[in-house]
Image: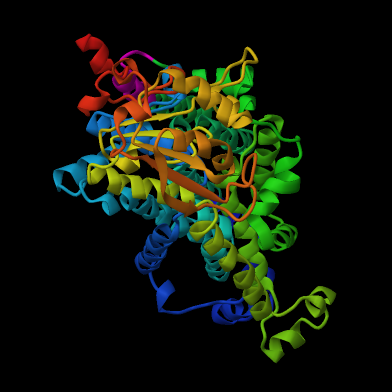
């Protein structure tokens, strides 16, 4: 039986580069021919992982820009609320369509920082979550290498790791605390163990399929849409496996039930009642198309714009790698995921991040088979018209570095950095006792929140919760006419100490703010080109001039309050001057 399985495994791997060469050459010759990079770094997996970890730590420190609200509002903000007792929960948590499993990772981090008295250091609170994610990302890099080695050979694995580390979108996104980033790591790890079941023999991988199923179950708890990947792999395995019924009855069902039970237990504990997050998620995003509220794209967007932009200059290399390697199962998985996500109206780059490393595997294959600069290898390929036209590997590598590194650095250090910088500034202002109440007049969730500020001060922002009745939310009403919106709300409000907004709205608000004794205290660069509605070149902070008499600033200070429709924070005001502000947090309602 073992001999039969070994023969099957070898035949399945017949398209590996070294098996394609039948000229009696040694392994070292074959490795050289396919662009080997043998050196001490690849001598052991532990050393290789340590290299990846160092790279991702630097990577996380270089990521200083804002990308997607979920990085802060659906992970760090939730963990901060549980750990420290104050924070904001968005409408998704009230509807029960988010699992607490992912925020629990950062909850543990916050508890450790609190125990070590490091939570009072702003830099630590801001940087540590991404440093933790960089730790996870390093395992993703290692398993991309191992997956390529398993499917092809060491040379392809080395070049795949090069692609993984130099791809601009991986550099830009994988260290972020998005659930998609952790989903990507877990997907790569589980696909590796799943492939061990197909490609390896012996007892070493006898339980690899079960391990892959368990990791995939955890991944589906974090991101229910990860099931798209495993529907494809599961159906393939069910059709091809000889023990298909044993696989389904004694592996898929028990492990899937265990994963569902773990997720339900965590959410039951955190929500306080039984909440079936996957079911609620399915109802909102698929059955009711709730995600369309935040914008839609054409069905072909992932194929024509989204995924090509993520691959960038790696795109032609990946396409050539697919054709040359003939790994149709893996390439079919990528097409399947892109195709299923294309059915949904609401589309985002990060949704298909888990299949980006798989596409980079094919780029690594192409680079490994590209012509080397040495003359004797060029002569060996003289018979191939492709290799006569293809530039040398050195030229291709320099091209990839020259196009991806500047892109990665610009997107990570420059584009949309104002949202992060303004919160770092406000964190110091709050620490010094200057920021007592903050009002954000930006598109909702345009900046981090309490997880960065880490001070129990009153903060409010414009609400943009889904309204399926067609009414405009606060954020849209403000953006349509900022001056009219604020003039209406200012009839009965208490003045915040700081107001934050984008430069595009400053011209309409400036006279209004000056009339209430506000003046500019800081301006942060944000972007060189249009992001949402208008060019948000910079983000501005205005503060209240406390030296002006109160009678000059407002007519009736005792009865004033914040605009009633502006989303209030979940924290009770600590300042005596703001004691009259309404608060909707659970503790305050109980005290009432």
**In the drawing, does residue 427 fall left or right of residue 187?**
left
Residue 204 x, y percent position in the rendering: 40, 52
Question: Which residue is most to the top?
Answer: 592
Is-magenta flag for residue 28? no
Where are the magenta residues, as a range? 262-274
**In the drawing, does residue 423 fall left or right of residue 316?**
left
Query: Which quarter of the rendering shows the C terminus?
Result: top left
Q: Residue at x 56, y 30 (%)?
A: 483
Front one among 238 and 555: 555
Q: Does 447 appear above or below 371?
A: above
**In the drawing, does residue 119 fall left or right of residue 28?**
left
Q: Does 449 appear above or below 139?
A: above
Q: Does 529 appear above or below 393?
A: above
Residue 548 x, y percent position in the rendering: 31, 36
Q: Is residue 213 visible?
A: no
Front one among 60 and 255: 60
Overall secondary structure of the magenta section: helix
**In the drawing, does residue 60 fall left or right of residue 346?**
left
Visual colour scheme: rainbow
Residue 371 x, y percent position in the rendering: 70, 79
Quarter of the image for residue 243 reads: top right
Count of all numbered marks drawn on residues in the image: 0
């Amino acid at each position: 039986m073992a001999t039969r399985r070994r023969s099957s495994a070898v035949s399945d791997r017949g398209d590996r580069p070294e098996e394609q060469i039948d000229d009696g050459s040694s392994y070292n010759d074959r490795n050289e021919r396919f662009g080997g990079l043998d050196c001490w770094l690849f001598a052991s997996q532990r050393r290789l992982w340590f290299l990846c970890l160092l790279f991702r730590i630097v990577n996380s420190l270089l990521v200083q820009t804002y990308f997607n609200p979920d990085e802060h509002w659906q992970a760090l903000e939730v963990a901060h609320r549980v750990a420290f007792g104050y924070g904001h929960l968005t409408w998704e948590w009230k509807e029960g369509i988010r699992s607490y499993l992912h925020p629990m990772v950062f909850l543990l981090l916050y508890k450790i920082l609190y125990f070590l008295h490091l939570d009072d250091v702003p830099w630590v609170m801001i940087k540590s979550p991404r440093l933790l994610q960089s730790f996870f990302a390093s395992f993703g890099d290692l398993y991309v290498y191992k997956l390529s080695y398993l499917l092809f050979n060491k040379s392809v694995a080395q070049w795949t790791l090069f692609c993984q580390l130099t791809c601009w979108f991986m550099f830009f996104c994988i260290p972020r605390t998005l659930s998609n980033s952790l989903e990507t790591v877990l997907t790569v790890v589980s696909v590796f163990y799943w492939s061990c079941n197909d490609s390896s023999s012996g007892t070493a991988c006898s339980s690899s399929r079960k391990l892959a199923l368990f990791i995939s179950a955890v991944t589906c708890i974090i991101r229910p849409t990860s099931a798209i990947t495993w529907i494809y792999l599961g159906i393939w395995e069910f059709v091809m496996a000889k023990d298909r019924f044993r696989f389904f009855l004694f592996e898929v069902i028990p492990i899937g039930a265990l994963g569902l039970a773990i997720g339900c237990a965590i959410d039951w504990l955190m929500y306080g009642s039984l909440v079936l997050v996957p079911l609620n998620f399915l109802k909102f995003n698929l059955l009711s198309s709730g995600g369309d509220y935040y914008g839609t794209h054409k069905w072909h967007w992932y194929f024509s714009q989204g995924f090509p932009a993520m691959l960038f200059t790696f795109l032609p290399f990946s396409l050539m790698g697919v054709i040359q390697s003939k790994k149709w199962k893996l390439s079919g998985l990528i097409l399947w995921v892109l195709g299923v996500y294309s059915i949904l109206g609401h589309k985002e780059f990060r949704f298909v991040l888990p299949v980006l490393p798989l596409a980079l595997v094919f780029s690594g294959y192409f680079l490994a088979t590209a012509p080397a600069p040495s003359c004797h290898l060029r002569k060996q390929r003289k018979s191939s018209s492709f290799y006569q036209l293809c530039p040398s590997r050195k030229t291709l590598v320099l091209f990839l570095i020259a196009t991806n590194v500047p892109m990665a650095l610009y997107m990570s250090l420059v584009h949309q950095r104002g949202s992060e910088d303004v919160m770092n500034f406000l964190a110091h202002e709050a620490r010094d006792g200057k920021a007592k109440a903050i009002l954000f007049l930006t598109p909702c969730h345009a900046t981090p929140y309490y997880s960065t500020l880490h001070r129990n001060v009153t903060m409010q922002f414009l609400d943009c919760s889904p309204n399926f009745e067609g009414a405009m939310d606060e954020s849209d009403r403000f953006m349509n006419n900022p001056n009219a919106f604020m003039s209406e709300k200012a009839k009965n409000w208490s003045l915040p100490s700081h107001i934050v907004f984008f430069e595009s709205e400053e011209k309409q608000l400036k006279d209004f703010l000056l009339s209430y004794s506000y003046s500019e205290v800081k301006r942060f660069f944000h972007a060189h080109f249009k992001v949402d509605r208008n060019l948000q070149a910079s983000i501005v902070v205005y503060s209240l001039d406390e030296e002006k008499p109160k009678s000059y600033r407002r007519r009736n200070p005792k009865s004033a309050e914040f605009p009633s429709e502006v989303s209030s924070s979940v924290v009770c005001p600590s300042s005596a001057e703001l004691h009259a502000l309404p608060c909707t947090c659970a503790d305050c309602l109980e005290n009432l």
